[in-house]
Image: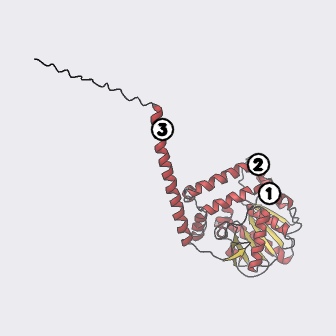
């Protein structure tokens, strides 16, 4: 008997895998997402470690005082009256100027709340609250009026609100490329855009990107102060404070408008304006001249070549600032008009 065996070899047909573009796009996005999260985590670690290293590397030049439930840094040098108060946001900004002015009288600089050695203060951070902080700081530290205030940028606007809020305490003023309350409106610029940029910067700071940007900056100050300012401008606290200041900017500008004139208080206005035919420069020049008109006893000067920041931080331009402060000091002491 013959047996026939049938083998049923069924060949499985191989069907090519047809993975469309969506599959590869999805996989790419997945790996990009993983890479992004990894970079963010590395950035946060980098920022945290570097910030702690900065805190150990530097120490305050002056003393810390308890003001309205937060610590504030004040640095006073020299002797004499009236006391000159320097307001530019940070003590280190006055590194070239404070020693020179201190040869003539007592001079105090301070870190605004949230900057360098001063702890953040309660919000809102508008001009009235910032002026109140400064007034309380001076009281706690035993720095009594009368005062001459030199204010740079927003510090100039804060100085005007301080003078308005505490009548009779400010007997002289120097405005250094100071903020005019109508600057943004007259220049056709948006405060809201500035606020948005400031908010974005607080996020970028937390992953170390603002630190990387600041690393390439140079403030033209002595080495120690230059390094300190770079460290501060790399910190989360600095950008959080910038956000708080810009969030309160509309209220600050209104308070500046309400501050009114200075009467016959000796006033010197220094403007850092490039001599060009640019319309924006013409507007800024007019705004600075309006600030000079706040007093019937004033002098207006343009410092050729100076920038908004280098007016303080470049030793050459800073000499004009020291000269202006001493000029106001002399006018206060002698009673003679500025000229």
Q: Nearer the viewer, mark 3 or mark 1?
A: 3
Q: Nearer the viewer, residue 301 or 2?
A: 2
Of label 2 and label 1, which has the lower sequence position? 2
Position of residue 141 relative to residue 308, above or below, is below
Q: Which residue is mark 3?
A: 26
Residue 300 horizontal side relative to residue 61, left or right: right
| The image quarter in which residue 317 lies | bottom right
Of label 3 and label 1, which has the lower sequence position? 3
Of label 3 and label 2, which has the lower sequence position? 3
Position of residue 311 relative to residue 282, above or below, is below
Could you tell me which secondary element the residue under label 1 belongs to?
Answer: helix
Residue 237, how many percent across, how many down? 63, 63
| The image quarter in which residue 174 lies | bottom right
Neighbour class for label 3 at 10 Å: few (<14), some, many (≥20)?
A: few
Could you tell me which secondary element the residue under label 3 belongs to?
Answer: helix
Could you tell me which secondary element the residue under label 2 belongs to?
Answer: helix
Q: Nearer the viewer, mark 2 or mark 1?
A: 1
Please tell me how many numbered marks the rendered image carries: 3
- Residue at 50% from the left image edge and 49% from the top image edge: 36
- Residue 187's label in the rendered image is 2
- Residue 251's label in the rendered image is 1
């Amino acid at each position: 008997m013959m047996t026939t065996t049938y083998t049923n070899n069924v060949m499985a047909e191989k069907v090519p895998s047809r993975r469309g573009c969506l599959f590869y796009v999805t996989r790419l996005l997945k790996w990009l997402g993983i890479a992004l999260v990894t970079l963010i985590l590395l950035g946060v670690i980098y920022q945290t470690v570097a910030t702690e290293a900065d805190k150990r590397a530097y120490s305050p030049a002056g003393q810390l005082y308890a003001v309205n439930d937060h610590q504030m840094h004040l640095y006073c040098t020299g002797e004499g009256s009236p006391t000159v108060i320097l307001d530019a946001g940070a003590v280190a900004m006055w590194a070239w100027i404070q020693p020179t002015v201190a040869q003539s009288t007592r001079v105090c600089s301070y870190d605004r709340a949230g900057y360098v050695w001063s702890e953040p203060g309660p919000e809102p951070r508008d001009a009235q609250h910032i002026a109140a902080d400064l007034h309380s700081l001076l009281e706690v530290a035993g720095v009594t009026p009368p005062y001459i205030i030199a204010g740079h940028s927003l510090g100039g606007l804060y100085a005007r609100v301080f003078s308005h809020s505490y009548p009779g305490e400010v007997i002289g003023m120097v405005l250094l490329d100071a903020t005019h309350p109508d600057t943004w409106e007259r220049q056709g610029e948006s405060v809201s855009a500035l606020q948005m940029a400031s908010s974005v910067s607080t996020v970028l700071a937390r992953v170390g990107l603002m630190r990387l940007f600041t690393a390439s900056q140079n403030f033209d100050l002595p080495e120690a102060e230059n390094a300190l300012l770079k460290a501060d401008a790399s910190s989360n606290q600095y950008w959080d404070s910038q956000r708080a200041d810009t969030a309160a900017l509309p209220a600050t500008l209104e308070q500046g408008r309400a501050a009114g004139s200075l009467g016959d208080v000796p006033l010197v206005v220094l403007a850092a304006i490039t001599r060009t035919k640019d319309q924006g420069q013409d507007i800024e020049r007019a705004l600075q001249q309006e600030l000079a008109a706040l007093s019937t006893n004033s002098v207006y000067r343009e410092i050729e070549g100076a920038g908004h920041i280098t007016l303080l931080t470049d030793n050459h331009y800073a000499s004009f600032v020291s000269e202006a402060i001493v000029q106001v000091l002399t006018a206060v002491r002698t009673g003679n008009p500025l000229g």
